[in-house]
Amino acid sequence: MRWLSLLLLSLGLPFLVPAQNPTVRIGVLGIFHTQQLTLAADQTGELLVSAADQRIFVRSGSACSLLQIRSSGASLLLSCGGKEIRAPQMRASGRNQQAAGLVIGVPGKVTRRYVGVLDLNVTDGELVPVVAIGLETAVASVVEAESAPGTPPEALKAQAVVSRSYFAAGRGRHSNFDFCDLTHCQSLREPPAADSPAASATAATRDLVLSFDEKPVTAMFTRSCGGHTRTLAEIGLVPSAYPYFSVLCDVCYKNPVRWTRKVSREDALLLLRGEIGRLAIDRVLGWNAVPSNNFITHEQDGEVILEGTGQGHGLGLCQRGARSMAQDGSGFRAIIEHYFPNTQLKVLSSVPDS
Ligand SMILES: [Zn+2]
Ligand SMILES: [Zn+2]
């Protein structure tokens, strides 16, 4: 199919390329470190659960409407409608192995709906649910989860392109799956309604990714940049294919988000290591313990005071800046061009190695 895509591109017809929707394997609900889950089909659907050469159909209104799953040693114990299965792993899909609406619950904590195929196994006694989600559904879910309420449509489109590029280029960030559902990768919850602003922005930019040097970019975004975005080298990270460039961000430059924090001398030393040190502190003290890597320090009563600007690592798309540019009339292409200099927007299927 690639030769056809290339031919159409050479004719200037990229949008006639037949729609392909690759999947991304996302580890979900890992934050709960759970040993128990429930699984149901959404609304009128039906799930086929396969484990140890056996099958269970899960359907609302039937004898098996809610599958109970728990870990037992290195095995899964499945029970539903009087049937029990012990197996090392299981898969849940639609009747013909296709993506289906899955409602996964962590008892007493959360219930969340996904559209995809669920693979489940046990690692170190914990259940590890991994959902293979269509790329566009995953992008819409991230745009919904990662954008501030009221974000203008063109800024949502820029976010969709950035999130899609990240999925296309950044696979393999975890050993059992490609991405988690937390800010470590990209926050992802339920897919938004088809007529929601997040879904519309995703559909309007379908298949578009950022490319640099003919490869998709693992595109990053930050809540606010403090005035300038950063390069990888500036924040002590190893260079990647796309080095990032520092660009002026008008709204943050004129009126940065300011913050003050107190940290121990030990943690202040850790911060000398740049972004890696900041993330190490945030992992222990909470994600907002040190909001950005852009600060000055002074000592007071044996503690170190940080006075900083910006929120997040400062790389790539500044979400606050993107909102401001969109409010001032910029389209998503101009926003992307501003925050990702030297990249091009391309159709995913036309980018080699994607
Ligand atoms: Zn992750
Ligand atoms: Zn900014």
Image (cartoon, rainbow, N blue to C red):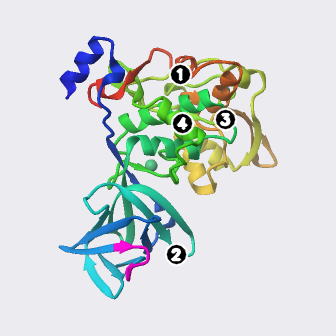
Q: Is residue 3 left or right of residue 18?
A: left
Q: Secondary structure at mark 2?
A: loop
Q: Residue 214: percent from the left, percent from the top?
A: 32, 19
Specify the amino acid type for callout 1. Answer: Ile
Q: Is residue 77 left or right of residue 108?
A: left
Looking at the image, tell me whether mark 2 or mark 3 is earlier in sequence order.
2
Q: Which mark is residue 107?
A: 2
Is most of the magenta stretch helix, strand or loop? loop
Tell me the residue that label 1 is attached to. 336
Mark 2, residues whose alpha carbon is within 10 Å: few (<14), some, or many (≥20)? few
Tell me the residue that label 4 is attached to. 200
Q: Residue at x 51, y 62 (%)?
A: 112
Please tell me whether residue 40 is drawn above or below residue 205 in the rendered image. Answer: below
Tell me the residue that label 3 is attached to. 151
Alpha-carbon span between mark 2 and mark 3: 33 Å
Circle 4 or circle 1, nearest the eye: 4
Specify the amino acid type for callout 4. Answer: Ser
Q: Residue at x 59, y 37 (%)?
A: 272
Specify the amino acid type for callout 3. Answer: Thr
Residue 162 visible in rendering: no
Mark 3, residues whose alpha carbon is within 10 Å: few (<14), some, or many (≥20)? some
Q: Residue 131: percent from the left, percent from the top?
A: 37, 56
Q: Is residue 60 inside the magenta stretch?
A: yes
Looking at the image, tell me whether mark 1 or mark 3 is earlier in sequence order.
3
Looking at the image, tell me whether mark 4 or mark 2 is earlier in sequence order.
2
